[in-house]
Each structure stands twice: as structure tokens, then as C-alpha cells.
Image (cartoon, helix red, strand yellow):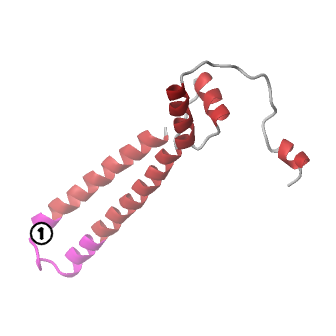
Amino acid sequence: MNDDTKRKNTRSRGTPIKVWVTPEERAEIADRADRAGLPLSAYMRAAGLNHRIKSVYDLEAVGDLVRVNGDLGRVAGLLKLWLTEKPGQGARRFEVDRIMTDFRDLQAKLSGIMRRAVK
């Protein structure tokens, strides 16, 4: 990639703003920028303009929750299949129904957590 291409893909530079911070504050800000997956200047710009800063970790956690939610759905589907093919075998119907209800409740909670995380 040559210098012309680099300039076309980056934000044009403007005027810097100096902010006096302690070494500890700078380390904390740099750590937060890193966790958000942003360069320090982009993080500071977003924070200074009061834009919501979404952490990369949040997005990874939501991806993990999506996978767990899918797994719960698959397990519930297998339980339902078992109930229809082998009624009354292994466990009483009301126990399995209670487990299915618990699965649905867990899926609803996971969905709520995912919605909050991506807002």
C-alpha cells in the first residue's frame, strides 16, 4: 500500500487538543481505548463528542451469547423430539415440560442481555 492509498483510507487530520492527565489516567484511557478496539485519538474523540463507545469485548460476548442461545434452542428441540417419539420414557412429562419452560426462560434472558449489550 503506498502513501496515497493510506491517506485516502484515513481520516483527515485536524487540530490536536491537549489534555493534561496523570500517568495513571493516561494508562486507564489507553486501556479503555484498547478494549474498545480503537486508537487512542479515536477513543478520545468519541468520548469528547459523547458518542457511545462499544467495546470489542461486548461484541465478542454477544457472539458467545448468540451461540449459547442457539445451543439452548437445539437442546430444547431434542427434548421436544424425544417427547414425541418416546412419550413417558426416562422422565415424567411434567418434568420435561418444566425443563422446556426453563430453557425458554433462559433464552429470553439471553436475548435481553444481547439487546442491552448491542445498544
Residue 94 location (% of width, % of height): 10, 64
Total labels: the figure holds 1
Indicate left or right for 98 with 8 as reference.
left
Residue that protrudes farthest toward the front in the picture: 23
Q: Main secondary structure of the magenta part?
A: helix
Quadrant where the N terminus lies?
bottom right
72 vs 34: above or below:
below
Which residue sits at x=27%, y=75%? 81
Q: Nearer the viewer, residue 71 or 39?
A: 39
Q: Residues in magenta?
A: 78-96
Answer with the quarter of the image where residue 49 lies: top right
Q: Nearer the viewer, residue 105 or 118?
A: 118
Residue 34 location (% of width, % of height): 56, 42
Q: Residue type at mark 1? A: Arg
Q: Which residue is mark 1?
A: 93
Q: Nearer the viewer, residue 40 or 8?
A: 40
SS for dot 1: helix
90 vs 63: above or below:
below
Q: Is 9 colored magenta in this rendering?
A: no
Indicate left or right for 15 with 104 as reference.
right
Q: Is 87 colored magenta in this rendering?
A: yes
40 vs 102: above or below:
above
Answer with the quarter of the image where residue 98 lies: bottom left
Indicate left or right for 86 with 43 as reference.
left
Determine crowd level at label 1: few under 14, some 14-19, many 20+ residues with C-alpha closer than 10 A.
few
Which residue sits at x=42%, y=56%? 64
Residue 107 location (% of width, % of height): 32, 54
Residue 11 location (% of width, % of height): 78, 36
Q: Nearer the viewer, residue 31 or 11?
A: 31
Which residue sits at x=49%, y=42%? 118
85 vs 10: above or below:
below
Residue that protrudes farthest toward the left in the picture: 92
